Image (cartoon, rainbow, N blue to C red):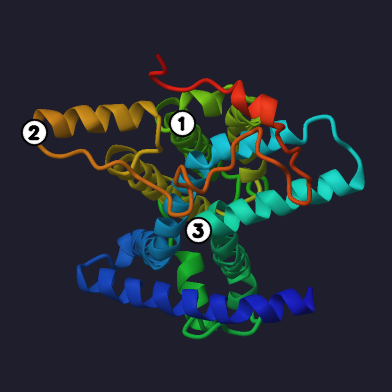
């Protein structure tokens, strides 16, 4: 835990300064006094926007990687078909080597889609600790975090939105206002998670990708993930729920743009985009993957590496059909 605290402290310090800066901005707009709680709540929203803007380059890489993964699926299925039923170590090793070569040639990475989530996780945990420790900082039990001194923490603790403090949670509060606000945020957070995944599967996945075991697992997760967030969200401070809801709304908008302008190959969204461009008289450019040309693709009946090719006899060669022989 000490190592985790040390690892998260620079992120927590940066988030504290960003929140403090946004709060100063909202104060200049008049959100003071009774509106101080909204100033801090909007500061969390501003912090979320800053984090998501910083993640845009990674998100772009994720989109390009996902599209490449869609296009190499036919080649991936050929490799799997080639080694189907072969469980010996040599065949397994050869299959893995061909898959890695396919990834290398096409510049794809199956883990690229996880990068934004993995990189965003430390920001989430750091914010959770920052908001969860506000009361301890205000009481002098925990040391200050950058500009969040004991006096500032006391101010944040005293400010409310709709009668609830940002550090309050559904489970650890007996106030009705807190429970209602937390429940509303949890429902919205779960609903935005479901909508985001639903539109991704309904519009931005080709039919071939929907008819496999992985897609069926995704459909199950489509309904399980909102329930997971609903049950876990009751432990999160309201400030963290605001962060989570804001990042979900950002993801929805970002995904809507991607589905409309950079759809997955073979998906319903790609067909809709092609029709829009044709109606406008614009050229439709197909998305291609370097290293996946027809010349690079190995046919199913090609000899395997190290396999001796059987020579053809003269009689067999003479029986080959010729064109336009009369």
Q: Residue furthest top?
A: 326
Q: Residue at x 62, y 39 (%)?
A: 76
Q: Which mark is residue 65?
A: none
Q: Vertically, is 259 above or below 288?
A: above
Which of the two discs, 1 and 3, labels the residue nearer the N terminus?
Answer: 3
Residue that label 3 marks: 166
Label 3: which secondary element: loop
Q: Residue at x 60, y 60 (%)?
A: 118
Q: Nearer the viewer, residue 203 or 246?
A: 203
Distance from disc 1 to disc 3, alpha carbons, whole Å, reads 39 Å
- The disc, 2 or 1, on the residue closer to the chain's N-terminal end is 1
- Look at the image and tell me whether residue 167 can be seen: no
Quadrant in the picture for residue 82: top right
- For disc 2, the marked residue is 280
Residue at which label 1 appears = 205
Horizontal arrangement in the rendering, residue 319 relative to residue 63 (left or right): right
Taking the image as shown, residue 289 lies to the left or right of residue 86, namely left
Q: Quadrant of residue 199?
A: top left
């Amino acid at each position: 835990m000490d190592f985790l605290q040390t690892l998260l402290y620079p992120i927590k310090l940066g988030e504290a300064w960003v929140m403090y800066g946004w709060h100063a901005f909202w104060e200049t707009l008049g959100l003071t006094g009774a509106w101080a709680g909204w100033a801090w709540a909007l500061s969390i929203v501003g912090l979320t926007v800053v984090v998501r803007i910083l993640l845009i380059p990674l998100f772009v890489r994720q989109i390009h990687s996902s599209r490449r993964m869609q296009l190499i699926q036919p080649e991936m299925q050929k490799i799997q078909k080639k080694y189907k039923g072969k469980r010996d170590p040599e065949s397994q090793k050869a299959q893995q080597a061909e898959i890695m070569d396919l990834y290398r040639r096409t510049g794809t990475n199956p883990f690229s889609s996880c990068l934004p989530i993995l990189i965003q996780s430390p920001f989430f945990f750091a914010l959770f600790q920052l908001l969860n420790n506000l009361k301890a900082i205000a009481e002098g039990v925990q040391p200050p975090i950058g500009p969040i001194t004991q006096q500032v923490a006391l101010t944040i603790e005293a400010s409310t939105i709709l009668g609830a403090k940002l550090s309050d949670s559904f489970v650890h509060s007996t106030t009705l206002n807190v429970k209602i606000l937390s429940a509303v945020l949890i429902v919205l957070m779960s609903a935005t998670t479901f909508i985001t995944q639903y539109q991704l599967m309904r519009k931005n996945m080709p039919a071939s990708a929907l008819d496999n075991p992985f897609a069926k697992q995704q459909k199950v997760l489509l309904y399980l993930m909102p329930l997971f967030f609903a049950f876990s969200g009751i432990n999160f401070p309201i400030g963290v729920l605001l962060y989570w809801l804001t990042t979900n709304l950002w993801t929805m908008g970002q995904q809507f743009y991607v589905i409309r302008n950079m759809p997955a190959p073979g998906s319903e969204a790609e067909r809709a985009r092609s029709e829009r461009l044709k109606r406008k008289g614009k050229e439709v450019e197909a998305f291609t993957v370097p290293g996946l040309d027809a010349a690079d693709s190995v046919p199913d009946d090609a000899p395997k590496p190290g396999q001796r090719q059987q020579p053809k006899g003269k009689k067999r060669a003479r029986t080959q059909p010729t064109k336009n022989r009369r």
